[in-house]
Amino acid sequence: MVNVNDMIFTRNGEGALISQEVELEFLPDKPKVKIVPLTRGKLQEIYAQATSENIEEKLKSDAEIIKNGLVEPKLTDEQLIDLKPNWATAITTAILAISLGTTQTDVSNKAEDAISAQELALKK
């Protein structure tokens, strides 16, 4: 029989999700950051933003992933605006990977597939 602890994210005594130190696999030198997984509810909220017709909501979705998942180093809202795209992508990929229980490579491949599908739809 499956154990409930295998099905849920681990929390500390204060109820906060426990952070994990991970390598950002898609950056040179593979720097490490501390992140927490996003819960199913938070992922659904961010997905709703990402698929919104409102362009401002779409743009906020990546920032929300980082704001909710990146523990260390902690970035301010101003720093999130100035975050270099390669760093934003690497951090977002790592957070989604631990949230979905998969690898950073799998998340990256799925994102590339989605982008290709959107490009094809735009060409029609």
Image (spheres, helix red, strand yellow):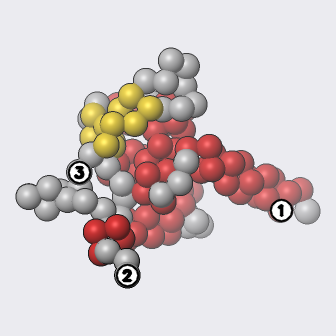
Indicate which label's residue lies in the foreground, 3 or 2.
2
Indicate which label's residue lies in the foreground, 1 or 3.
3
- Residue 102 lies, in percent from the top left, at 53, 54
Instruction: Write down the quadrant of residue 37 in the picture.
Output: bottom left
What amino acid type should be assigned to the residue bearing mark 3? Ile
Assign the C terminus to one quadrant of the image. bottom right
Labels 2 and 1 touching (C-beta < 8 A): no
Q: Which residue is mark 2?
A: 1
Q: Residue at x 48, y 32 (%)?
A: 24
Marker disc for residue 62: none
Q: Residue at x 30, y 75 (%)?
A: 4
Tell me the distance, in whole angstroms, between the alpha carbons under discs 2 and 1: 45 Å
What amino acid type should be assigned to the residue bearing mark 2? Met
What amino acid type should be assigned to the residue bearing mark 1? Ala
Labels 1 and 3 touching (C-beta < 8 A): no
Indicate which label's residue lies in the foreground, 2 or 1.
2
- Residue 95 lies, in percent from the top left, at 43, 47
Q: 87 above or below 104? A: above
Q: Which residue is mark 3?
A: 18
Instruction: Write down the quadrant of residue 83 in the picture.
Output: top left
Could you say whether the residue bearing mark 2 is in a helix, strand or loop? Answer: loop
Assign the N terminus to one quadrant of the image. bottom left
76 and 13: which is toward the camera: 13
Q: Residues within 10 Å of mark 3 (few under 14, many from 20)?
A: some
Q: 20 above or below 75? A: below
Tell me the distance, in whole angstroms, between the alpha carbons under discs 1 and 3: 40 Å
Tell me the distance, in whole angstroms, between the alpha carbons under discs 3 and 2: 25 Å
Q: Which residue is mark 1?
A: 121
Q: Residue furthest top?
A: 29
Give the mark, 2 or 1, whose residue is nearer the N terminus.
2
Q: Residue furthest left?
A: 14
Could you say whether the residue bearing mark 1 is in a helix, strand or loop? Answer: helix
